[in-house]
Amino acid sequence: MTRVAVTLNVMRNAFRAGLADYRAIFTWKSWLAGWYLRVIAQVAFFALIGERLEDDEKTMYLLVGNSIMIAAVVGVFSLNMTTSERGAGTLPLLVASPSSPVVVFSARGAYLAVDGALSALAALAVAGPMFGVSLPWPDVLAVVPLTGLVAVASYCFGTFLAGLVFRFRSVNNLVVVTTHVSLMAACGVNVPLSFYPEPLEWLSRLLPLTNGLLGIRGVFGGADPTTILGDAALEAAVAVAWMTVALATFNRLAARGRRDGSLEFAS
Amino acid sequence: MPDAVEVEDVTRVFEPRKKKDERVVALDEVSLTIPEGEIHGLLGPNGAGKTTLVKILSTVLLPTSGRARVCGHDVVEETKAVRPLIGIVFGGERGLYWRLTGRQNLEYWGALYRLPPAAVRERTRTLLERVGLADRADQRVEQYSRGMKQRLHLARGLIGDAKVLFLDEPTTGMDPIAGREFRTLIGELKGEGRTILLATHDMVEAETVCDRVTLIDRGKIIATESPRSLGHVISRFQRVDVEGAPEPVLGRIAALEGVSAVTRTEDGGARIEVSEEGATAEVLRRLVDAGVTSVRTSLPSLEEVYVQLIGERGLEV
Amino acid sequence: MRGFLAGFGLELRIVRAAPDALMPLLTAPLFALVFLAIVRQSGRADLEADALLAPVLMTLWWVALQHAGHLITGDRWQALLEPVIATPTSLATILLGRIAALMGLGLLSFGEVLIVGKLVFGVGVPFEHPVEMALTLLATAFATAGTAIAFAAVFVMTRNAYTFTNSLSFPLYLLGGVFVPVAFLPGWIQPVSSGVFMSWSADLLRATVKRDGIGDFWSRLAMIVALGAASFLLGRLILFHVLARMRAKGELATV
């Protein structure tokens, strides 16, 4: 096999392993009752704030922002993956295998990106009509790839954070939840970027979700396709950037772990 | 005065949780009486039903049928009367708050046993000293070794000043020195007039600290004896492992009275099993006379003794 | 009382050693910022106090659901449930102490939102009816604790309870009307919502920061306490049956 074929094969198998894990947690029934119910409730919670403000435009703004937020929420769950890998004692085995752990991880967690995008779109599709927000057809189709990009970028960001907190397993959950709410606060989900002071505005452009969400709002607002494409390109660039940093972090971790023995077989 | 522990025809059946699982009879009409002040060993291999009996006596599990009393109080109905009287030590590393220090753990349990705060502090201090954890008292339990956790368990069981102590494999994971200290401690506890039920699979432990020992296997009581007669039983079944013994010598030994079997081992040696007292000495003499000096005698494992005992008494295994 | 205090102290020590339980204290100020930003951007200064109070209620709910709700399950997994049961102190008393400690910590979020509101947006909570406000917060903490006991008793019998509770947070924020009053919910949900003590708490708490008088304060407060007490009694009842069942089936410990 060629190198590419080998890598693809590794990724395919890792993806399957990830999916199997996921299936062990969720059946489609428990997904609907357990997860999707929360998704709808979360979106409705924020959209209702718009209703309380008696501002239809704001309702629409909150509804779209918080629906797409779901893609980021799921993507960031990639933070948990390395930790669970560590808990299961499989991490050193991965490092010792001829495949790069990052390749394995990213494929193993790819279901998160898929699940995130689907959850976000399903939220939009159901919560939209609930609050009388019309989704312009067929423009709305452009939202699908953009949401996928948001999910992937958030996934990459989560992987980066996983490397960052790798040595402090106990704070993992803390970081996941704080990241969720921070993204909610900083990425133009609930108020436009112009509401923030300028430096913060730039900072939030570096985070996942921000650019992709702008593009999606552009689709709903009938913006110029080149503007939307520009936002999409930025979201993709953010994804690549965070994944690159994640890669570097993990290589350093593996190197350090081999030196000081911190890659325990069981912890 | 009622006996410290009375068990009458206690049976405990675990119904299968899944269809394919089998129904387990963990205790089968077990009866047992432990007078006050006795140290009683409950000796048996893993899965014999020891833990089940300890759990029933400590009020956390119900028997399927039969009755059990602690100091005259029924463990099913009168839990309020039983609980202040008992202390329990379950084996293993779990059962402690890992994020708390040893001292904090003991203080918590002391409060649950309704000791006034000053008494809790005092007892915690003395118990930590008693189990040799005074230096490490303010470290978190997660930093303790297995043996230290085990000693903390023991202190936990003692915090409520129990009249009756149930110890389930309390020395698991202790190093030999700690094990010896533990046995000294048991002696002290007896001196204080406490009754102890010690469940263990360690024959030496049972032999050294117990007044009487009950052998249990597959939920049934096989015998209740004093350790001396138990030791008698066990030493009768000695075995001798030899290397390089000539075939004719082994043949003559096999014919001796009291030698129950001679078997060849895979590495070319042989194992001689003895079933009567005094026969070992004769076997050894014959071996030395034949110039065989690579000889080792050992006691059979508990399970082997069971097989012997059960076989002798014609019980169904 | 001793068991209650033991539980209270235990939980404080556990939290000090492993601050996971304080997670909502990290998110409460962030949620306050999100809510404040929304109302500020819409120019609705009248809702700023409400935006600050919502995260406090969310914190209490979260603690009850994610932490207090799993206390029995956690003890069981660590082989602690059997030795606790075998002590002369009742499990419900210990639990109540542990949950009270958690509620006390949860109420710290009130101080946090005050600070964040002041620092970032220069907004405070107008203490128009301070005594009523304090009473409402206390009654709410009590009712949340009662509900948490019921959660704990149910969750110990539920497989995958962790996955499940993760999903319950926002539905409960919604039903409890923590930010948007229940009156804005669709009509068919409202009867359900009025059975949730949090919706009474949220409405009453919001009333205590308005200059107008609070209508029916005492009866509304009594409603919160009554709903909380009902949850507590129900929780105890469930707990009693769950423990009896586990004692019979030998499930107090996991293998």
Image (spheres, coloured by chain):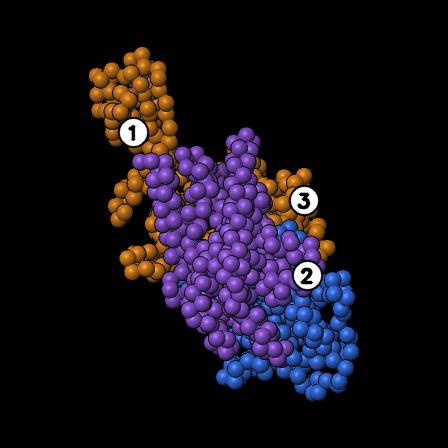
Position in image of residue B48 (x %, y %): 37, 48
Position in image of residue A88 (x %, y %): 45, 45
Who comes first in sequence, dot 3 or dot 1?
3
Position in image of residue A12 (x %, y %): 36, 46
Chain holding disc 2? A
Residue for point 57% across, 42% down: A167
Crowd class of label 1 (few under 14; some 14 to 19; many from 20; radius 10 Å): many
Q: Secondary structure at mark 1?
A: strand
Q: Secondary structure at mark 2?
A: loop
Disc 3 residue type (three-letter): Asp
In depth, the one of A225 and C71 nearer the eye is: A225
Tell me, by letter, which chain the rendering colours orange.
Answer: B
Tell me, by letter, which chain the rendering colours blue.
Answer: C
Q: CA distance from mark 3 to mark 2?
A: 48 Å
Residue for point 60% across, 62% down: A188
Q: Is residue B294 left or right of residue A48?
A: left
Disc 1 residue type (three-letter): Glu
Residue for point 72% across, 85% down: C214
Can marks 1 and 2 be said to lie on one chain?
no
Residue C133 visible: yes
Q: Quadrant of the N terminus of chain B?
A: bottom right
In depth, the one of A192 and A180 nearer the eye is: A192
Position in image of residue A219 (x %, y %): 50, 65
Look at the picture and state if B174 lies above or below C89: above
Q: CA distance from mark 3 to mark 1?
A: 52 Å
Could you say which disc has been placed on residue B273 in the image?
1
Q: Colour of chain A?
A: purple
